[in-house]
Image (cartoon, rainbow, N blue to C red):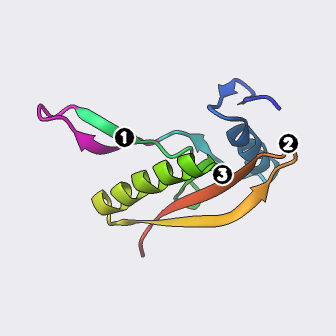
Amino acid sequence: METSVGARPFAHRSEAEFAQILDFYGIRWEYEATTFPLAHHADGRVASRFAPDFYLPDIDLWVELTTIRQALMRQKRRKLRRFTALYPELRSEEHTSELQSHSFISYAVFCLKKKK
């Protein structure tokens, strides 16, 4: 499986597959469209940031994909806890059921949406 769709490169094959699924269903998406600062150095420079993989503008939803490997899941959950503490106007949902892709990559989906 390619790690790009058209001219767009992705960090992981699961992201390319997800983009193809969105394209198939005609869902508009932007890749890593927004970066949220999570921590700053003493001089104000950003020390840590979070850039969700996809933004779906028609439904105002950010989506983060993670391959299901325990170390990655722990790291991602830690970032998401920090994210939700800093950005309380957004809510985070983890869809923990494994999504099995046709290339046998299992991944979890984290959704970030504005609270109503």
Q: Which mark is residue 58?
A: none
| Quadrant showing the N terminus | top right
Q: Earlier in the sequence, mark 2 or mark 1?
A: 1
What amino acid is found at the position of numbered circle 2 in the picture? Ser
Disc 1/disc 3 C-alpha distance (Å): 21 Å
Other residues around mark 2 within 10 Å, as few (<14) / some (14–19) / many (≥20)? few
| 113, 104: nearer the viewer | 104
| Quadrant showing the C terminus | bottom left
Q: Which residue is rendered at x = 41% and y = 54% of the image?
A: 78
Comparing marks 3 and 2, which lies closer to the viewer? 3
Considering only vertical position in the picture, is 110 above or below 75?
Answer: below
Question: In this figure, which residue is indicated by the disc labeled 1?
Answer: 49
Question: In this figure, which residue is indicated by the disc labeled 3?
Answer: 68
Mark 1 and mark 3 residues within 8 Å of each other at the beta carbon: no
Residue 15: percent from the left, percent from the top? 68, 41
Dot 1: element: strand
What amino acid is found at the position of numbered circle 3 in the picture? Ile
Magenta span contains residue 89: no
Residue 36: percent from the left, percent from the top? 36, 45
Q: Which residue is rendered at x = 73% and y = 60% of the image?
A: 98
Q: Magenta part of the protein: which range?
A: 34-45
